[in-house]
Image (cartoon, coloured by chain):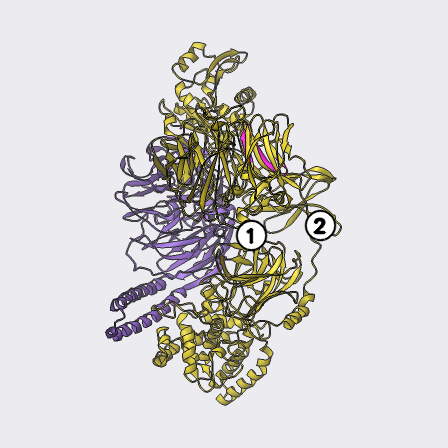
Amino acid sequence: MNTVLRWLRQLMARKVGAGTTRAAQSSGALPRDSQQCGGFSPTHEPPGGWLDFQRLAEGRFRGTNCGFWRAVESLHEPEGKLPPLTRPSGTLSPPRRRGEGWGEGCASSKFRGTNREPWRLGESIPGGEGQGEGGLGHTLRATVLHSVEINPAILRFPRFPLTPALSPGEREKVTTAGTNLTPEASIQPETGLAAAPERRAPALLVLFTSRFSKDWSPALRFAVSLVTLCVATPLFAQQEPGLIAHWRFAPERSLGDNVKPVAGGPEVTFRGPVKFIADPGPPRAELDGQTTDLTVAPDLSKALLPTQDVSVESWVRMDRAGTWGAIFGALQDNGEFERGFLLGNRDSAFCFALASEKTKKLNYLASAKAFELGRWYHVVGTYDGAALKLYVNGTLAAEAATESGPIAYPPKAPVTIGSYQDDDEHYRLTGAIHEVRLFRRALAAGEIGSRYAARKAEFPEPAPPPKLLRLAYGPFVEWRDRNTAVVSYETDAAISTRLELELPGGKKVSLGQDGTRTRHEVVLSNLKPDLEHHYRILAPADGANPVQSKRYQFDTTFYWEPPMVPAAAAKVAAGDTKLAKVAADLLKQSGARDGYCFVLGAVDGRLALELVRQSRMDVIVVESDPARVAAVRKTLDRAGVYGARASVHHAKGNELPFGDMMANLIVSESALLNGEPPFVAAAEVARLQRPVGGAVLLGTPNRSFAKQPSRTDWEKWAAGAELPLAKLEAGEDGLWLRSIRPALVGAGEWSHQYGSADNSACSQDELVGGELQPAWWGDPGPRPMPDRGNRNPAPLSVNGRLFVQGNRVLFGLDAYNGAILWSLSAPEVRRANVTRDCSNWAAAGDRVYLVHGRYCLALDGQTGARSQRFEVVENTPGAYDWGYVSVTKDWLIGSRQKSGGAYLGDDGEWYEDYAPDQVSRVTSDRLFAYEPATGKLKWTYQRGAILNSTITIADGMVLFLESRNPAALATNTCRLPNEVLTDQVLVALDANTGRELWQKAHDFSACQFMTYLVYANSTAVVTGTDKNKNYHTFAFNAPPPGRKDAGDSVEDAIPGRLLWSDTHKEDKGHHSGHLQHPLIVGSTFFSDQRSFDLRAGKLLRTDLPERRGCGVMSAAKNAVFFRHHFHGMWDLKSDKRIQFEGIRTGCWLGLITSGGMLLAPESSAGCSCTHAIQTSVGYFPKSLLKR
Amino acid sequence: MRNFHLRSVLLSPLLALALVAPALHAADWPTYAGNYARSGVSPDPLPTSPAEAWVWRSAQPPQPAWQGEAKWDGYNKVFDMTPRQIFDRAFHAVVAQGRVYFGSSADDKVYCLDAKTGRELWSSYTEGPVRLAPTIADGRAYFGSDDGSVYCVDAVTGQPVWQTLAAPKDRRIPGNGRVISNWPVRTSVVVMSGTVYTTAGMFPSEGVHLVAFDAKTGKELWRQVQTDLPAQGYLLASKSRLYVPAGRNNPVVCELATGKRQRVVEGAGGTYALLTDDMLVFGPGKNGQLGAVEEGQSDQLASFQGNHMIVTPTRSYLHSDTELSALDRARYLDLARQRKALAKRQSDIVKEIRKLGEKPENAAKRDALKAELTGIGTKVDELTAGMENCLVWKIACRWPLSLVLAGETVVAGGEDEVTGFNAADGKTVWTLPVKGKAYGLATADGAVLVSTDAGTIHCFRGPGQRAALESKEGRR
C-alpha cells in the first residue's frame, strides 16, 4: 500500500508542472475559443480520433488535485472486481467540496478565465450536450494516463475513448479539423466516453500494472499492459447503452452527505434525515416527505441531461400521494412558464411530464391506474423526440404524441430525486427509492418489460397497510414536571391501546394501560429536555392490518413552567404554618396564581418564600432598608429560589422603578409581620396594579404577628391615592385594605379572528395610539411557532389574557405582563389559510373556545384546563368536523363541515397564488347555536354550502355567503373550487333563532382569490379579488332585526339592497397585496390601500400605509397596525406612521389591540431575515403610563 | 453534515493590528474568551491528563434569555436552523490571580471562587440576571446586569466600588420572564485604559445605548444611542474600535474613543464573534456559517462553514457541528494576498477591454489583454486551489458547543464531555466527563474550566497540580 501512496504522491508532484507547460506549448494551435478557455479544449489525434490528454491533464491539475483522489476512489466502483485500494489518508488533499458532482468536484475552478462565464468540467455548456461524460472522463483518465505517460497505443484503444464537453461551436471545429470523430459521436457514451466507471477500471488496471512493473523492459511493460487490458476490459465492460447515470440508494453507497453513483454521475447530495436501509431489502433510501432532499445538481447547468431522447427508470415505493411529486425532476412549472421534464406522480397516479421545444408546455402523462401506497413499483418514462411513454411495472401505462423535438429546458432548475422542486414549489416524496437510472435514449417497451421481469422478485409484496386509528378526542400532552408528561386521548369504542414512543435516536418504547376503555391516559416519564419525540397510538390489529394513529410530535424543549422550587425551600420555611396559611389566604382572596407578585416592604423574606412555594408567581420583594434587603436575600438564597423565582430590589426613593400595570398581586410583609404600612406611597402601589383583577391586599391579621395599624394609619397612607375600588375592611381576620383593579375604561378586546365576530378587524379599543412603549417581552419565541404564520388563526385577547396558537401548541399569557399562564401540546389543533377558511378559536370572558376535530372545547383562560365540550350537530364519527366558531355570553355558534377539509399548512405553503389547492374555499353545510352555559342546542340552519370565510355575526344577525349549486353539497369534500361555488347568495339569519331574515342573490363570481364579508353600522361588505388581482367590493344594506335601518329613508329599510360597489386593481402588487382583509373603523371602510365611506362608498383616501410583508392590517379606534419592514402603526389622529425597528410580525394577522395594549406575539419564526429580535411583545401607549 | 469550505472570495492584505488584551498575569483569563478580541486562546499549556479538581453547582440552572431559533424556514425549506443568540446558556467563567469569577442568570449574582478549591470567596447581588461573564481589570471586577446597571466591585473582597446605570433611566418591566430593565446590559463590559465600555438596550425604538464610564469612579464619559439594532452578545474591542454584536443581526463597528458608529458589517447575523489581526469573524447565521469581514470594510471577504473559529498567527481552527479542522493560515494568507493582487489586475484589464470597445483598430491590443487575462485566470485558479489545499488536518468532532486553544491543545465542549486535541495533528489527547452541555470553556494556570447548561462549573487540573494543592490545603 505504501508503494501505491508513494506513487500517487510522486505522480502529483511531477505532473502539475508538466501539464501546464505542454498546454502552453500547444495553445497556439487551438481554436480561439479554446485559447480563451485556458487551452482546455480537446483536439484530436488522427487517425484514431482520440483526444489530447495532456491538455486535459493540464486543465485538471490547474484546478485542483482532488480529482486524483476521486480517481482512486473510483477504482472501488466496480464493486469488488478490483483489489480494493485504501484511501491514502493524509497524503493527498481530499475532494475540495463533498457533495458536488463528480465533474465539478474534480475541476471546479474557473478554467475559463474571466472573459466569459466560468466553464467547469461536468457543467453543461449552453447548447451543448454530452458534458457529463466529459466531466467524468476527463478527470480520471487525464490524470492517470497523462501522469504515467502511458504508451499512446492505449489512448487509442477502442474500448477506452474519451469525450470532452464541447460546445456546438467547438464540436464543429473539431469535426472540420479533419478528424473522424463526428460531433454526435463525440457525445454518445456508447460510442464515445464510457460514463460508467466499469469502463475506466480496465485502463486503470493497466496503468497500475505498467507502473508497478517499472523494472521491466519497456516492451515487456507494454505487452503486459495490453494483455491485462484485453483481459480486464470484458470483465468491466458492463456499460449499459446510453446510460448517463445510475444511482442506487443503499447504505454502502452513501458517503457523508453524498450518494455515490454506481455509474455515471454526479454524486447525489442529500440533506435532512435520509434513512438508508439495507435489510430487510431491497436496499433503499427512506424519505420522510418533510425534511429530506436528494439533489443531483443544484442547477441544470451542472447536470448531465440529454437534449432529446431520454429515459428515466426507477424502483420506488410511495407511502403518501401528494398532489405533485417527482421521482426524478428537472423542471420549472411556474404559471405560464413550463420547461424540463419529470418522472413522478400527480395525486395517486404515476406520471411522466416533459416539455418539448414544440409545445414548451409540460405535458403531464399520467397512469390511469392509481398506485398502492406501500407497494414497490418499477416506473419508467421515455421520450424519443416524438412519443412520450410511461411504463409501470413493465407495462405501458400511458403514451402521448403531443411532443416533438428536443426537450425544452428552463434556463435554470435544480435536478432532484424524490422531490418536485422549482422556483415556486417544493413537494417531497414520502416513501422509498431503491434506484434511479437516467438514459440518453428511449428504452424500448420490450427492454423495459425484461428489466422489470428480471428484478421484480427482489421487491417484496407490501405488508398489510396500517389502518388509520381516528381518535375521537385528543391527544393532548401535559407536563407533570420537567421529566414527566401525560398523554391523554379518547377513542369512540372501548378498546385497549398502546402508545408507541420513539425516543430520540429511533428506539421505540411501548407504553399504555391494561384493559379496554374509551378514555386513555399514558404517562411519559424520564423525558430528557430539549429533544423531539414522536409517538403513535396503536390499537388492536384489524385482521392482518395494524391499526394506528397518525405520528405525532412532542418536543421537550417546550416547557414553560416556572423554575422548580428545590427541596431546600421546605426546610427554610419549616414550622411557619401560620404564615403559610396567611399566604394561602392572600392567594385565594386575590385569585392570583401566575405572573408577578410584589411584596412592598419586607422583614426577612418568609412571606415571599411562602408565596413562591404556594403559587407559580415570580415574587419581587421591594425594600428600602439595606439590612432587610440582605436578610430577605439570605432567606430566599438558602431556600434555593433566589433569582429565578424571587428577587429583592432595593428601593432608593419613593418612586419605584417598575413599569405600570404589571402586578397581579401586591402585598406587604412589613405590614403583615410588623404592622407597618408599605414604605412607598399608595399611588405607587396603584400604578403597579394590573387592570382586570390586579389585587392589592394589605393588612395585619388579628392575633398574629404584630400590632395592627389603625384605620387612621391606613387612611393616612392611602390618602390622595387612587387605589381602584379600594375598601378598608375590618373583619375576623383583621383590618385589611383591599383593592381590585377593573378593566381600563375605553379598552377593547380581540375575541375573534378579525377582532369580533363582525369581522371588522377593529378592536374598538380607544386607548391605543400615539407613542407606544414596550410593556413586556419574552416567550413564546420563534421555536414553537409555525413558520412565519402562513395565514394562521390570529391571536386572541379578552379579559386581560392573551391566547396564542403555535404549531400545534397553545399558549395562555397574561396580556399585561406576558407571564405564560399555560401551554398545551395539542397535535390535532392546526389550521392555516384562514384567507379561504375561518379561524378555529374564539374567546369570551374567562374561556377560550377551541375547535378540535368534531368538538369545540371550552378551555379555562387562566389554567388551560378543558372545562366543557360541545359536539358538532348531526354527527357521524369520522364524517364531520367542527368548522367555524364564534362565542358571546348568549350563544356559541358553530358550523359543520365534511371531515379533513381544513388547510393545515404543514409544508410551509404560502397560499399566495391562484391555484385550486390554494384558493378553494372551505365550506360548511350546517350552522348551529348552543347555549354556552348549558350546552343546550338552540337552533340549526342548513341550505347551501356556506363559505366559512364569510360568516359574520353582529347586531343579532348571522350573515354569510352560501353557494346554492347542488353540486357544492354533493361532493365528498368541503374544500371547493370556484367552479363549484356558483349561485352565491348573501343570507342573514336571526342569531337567536336561526330563522332566515332575508337573502340577496348577487353575482360574486369576481371574488376568485378569496371572499370576505365584514359588517358595521347596518352595512355588510363583500370583498374579493379576481385572478388578475382586481379588488371587487360590494356593500349591502343590512339593517339589524328590530331596527329598521341606519338612516331615515325608506330605501335604508330594504335589506340586501346594494349600496355601492367598487373595482380597482390591487395597489401593492406583491406579498399578499391582493389578499388584504378589509377594516372598518367607525364609518370608514379600509381595503387594500384605499378607504371609503362605509355607507356611501365615496373614495376617501388612496394612501394607506405601504406594507412590505405578507401581513394584513388590524385596527383600534384610533390607529391601524400592519407590518411594513417591522411592526408598524398608523395613528389615525395624527396621521403619523411609525415602525418598531428590529422586530416583525408574521404573514397574516399578528398585531392585535386589546385592553389598552398592542399585543404582538412572535410569529416571524423561520424568517431567513436578520431581524434583530424575535420575541412576543406587549406595548402600552405612553399616554397611559406614569413610568 | 457541515464541511470545511472556503468561499472563493478575496482576502485583503494584513493590517498590522495587534490583539488587544488586558495586561494581566500570563496565566489569567480575565474576560470572556481570554481577551477583548474574544480569541479563546491561551499560551499556557494544559496538563496531559487532567482530572476534576472541583465542581460548583448552581441551585437553579442557567435561565437563557432566548429559547432558540425556529424549527424550520418553511419558505426556503431550511431545516435545523442554528440559533443566532448563544451567549448565556452557561455561566462563563473568567480567571484572575487565582480566582474564578462568573455571573449567574439564575440568581442574579456574580461569584468569586478560589480557583484551587472551588470554595466560594464572595458573591455580589445585582437586581437582574447576569447573563455574561464579568471582566477583571486592575484588581476590580466589572459586570453588567439585566437590571440596566454596570457594577464595579473589589476583585478580592467583592466590596462595591461603584454602580451606575448604563440604561438611560431606571424603568423595569417583565422581559424574558423576569422583571428587568427596559435597557438590559447584555454585551458584558470592556475595560481598557481606565475606561469601561458597555451597552444597554433591547428595543431599537427605545434607543440602544453605547456608554463609556471612568473605570475608577463610574462617571459617565460619553453615550451614543442607536435606533436600529439591539446590543446582545460579548462586546469586542481593538485598540481603536468597539464591535457591538446585535443579537440575530450583524455587529456594529464603532470608534473606541467616542462610540460613534462607523458601519454595520454584512453577514447572516449572530452573537458569536472574534477579532483576528485583520478581520472580524462572526456568525453563525442561520446555517452555522462564519463570515469574515476585513478591518475597515463592511462586506464579507470570506465565509467558513462552522460555528466557532480559533485563529493563531500560523493556523486557524474551524469548528462545525460535526468537524474540527486546522488550516495553514500563513500559507493561506500568502496565497490570498497574491490572489488579491491578480484579481485587481483582472478587474483593471476588464475595464481596459471595455474601454477599447469593439473598434477594429484596437483588436491587437484587445487580444493581448485577453491573453493576459487568460493567463491571470489560470494563475488565480492555481492560487485558489492552493488556498483550498491549506487544510492541515480535519477530524470528525462530536463536541460542537465551544472551542478554545491552550498551548498546544485545542479544547472542544460537547454534551456531557469536553475533549482536548493535539493542535498539531488533531489527535485526541483526553476526554473529560461533565454534567450537561459544555457551552463555556476557559483555561488558566493549567486548569480547564467548563461551564454547562446544567449550571455547573467543572475545574480540571493535572495530577501534579492537584497533589500540590492538596498538600497545601493539608498544611492549612
A927, above or below A437, in the image: above
A472, above or below A23, in the image: above
> Which residue type carries mark 2?
Pro
Query: In the figure, is residue A25 to the left or right of A371?
Result: left
- Is B333 included in the stretch rendered in magenta? no
* Nearer to the camera, B304 or A47: A47
Mark number displayed over residue A290: 1
What's the chain of the residue with tag 2?
Answer: A
What's the chain of the residue with tag 1?
Answer: A
Q: CA distance from mark 1 to mark 2?
A: 24 Å
- Count of marks placed on residues: 2
Range of magenta residues:
A841-854
Q: Is residue A275 visible?
A: no
> Which residue type carries mark 1?
Gln
Chain B pictured colour = purple
Query: In the figure, is residue A494 to the left or right of A1062?
Result: right
A469, above or below A109, in the image: above
Element on which disc 2 rests: strand
The chain coloured yellow is: A
Query: In the figure, is residue A837 to the left or right of A520?
Result: left
